[in-house]
Image (cartoon, rainbow, N blue to C red):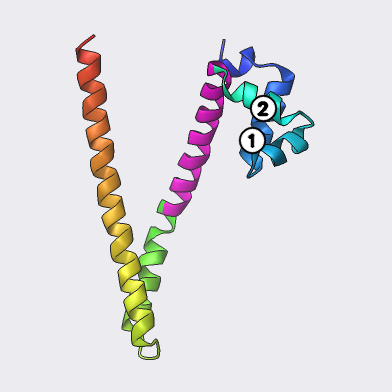
Amino acid sequence: MSENDRLSTNQRKALKALLECSTIRAAAESCGLGEATLYRYLRDDTFKAELRKRQDGIVSSVTAALVGLAGESVKTLRDILDSKTASDSVKVRAALGWLAQMRQSVELADLAARVEALEQASMGGK
């Protein structure tokens, strides 16, 4: 039995609303439940696990779409940097933006590797 099967109809409506709305209040209005009910659901381990699973799925989809745009994005940056008509300030902003994203990507990859190593170490210790 999946976690989703253990959720009530109202909890499944709340999940959908929480994933589509930007605030708890908006989600509560969207699914016709009270804010207090949504906050209570958010304290439930099964509900939280299903919400996290669905959020992870959304993040994975967005990440895949962004990866798909990587080649086009690099070409766009290259075009800007090589442009004879783009101002120096535009070129600098484009270069700095790219460098910041590269640094963040390296940091995230490092963090992911460290978390994986910690998870492996904790599994070995049990």
**Residue 45 position within the rendered picture, expressed as x and y whole percent measured from the top left:** 53, 17
**Quadrant where the N terminus is found in the figure:** top right
The amino acid sitting under disc 2 is Leu
Q: Earlier in the sequence, mark 2 or mark 1?
A: 1
The residues colored magenta run 45-66
Residue in the picture at 31% in, 72% down: 95
Q: Based on the displayed image, in which of its 4 quarters is residue 77 positioned?
A: bottom left
**Residue 57 position within the rendered picture, expressed as x and y whole percent measured from the top left:** 50, 35
- Does the segment drawn in magenta span residue 48? yes
- In the image, residue 27 sits, relative to residue 49, either above or below, namely below
Q: Nearer the viewer, residue 105 or 1?
A: 105
Q: Dot 2 corresponds to which residue?
A: 38
Mark 1: which secondary structure? helix
The label on residue 18 is: 1
The amino acid sitting under disc 1 is Leu
**Residue 83 position within the rendered picture, expressed as x and y whole percent measured from the top left:** 36, 85
- In the image, residue 25 sits, relative to residue 5, either above or below, namely below
Residue in the picture at 40% in, 91% down: 85
The reply, left or right, for residue 107 in relation to residue 70 is: left
The reply, left or right, for residue 126 in relation to residue 29 is: left
Residue in the picture at 23% in, 42% down: 110
Marks 2/1: CA–CA distance: 9 Å
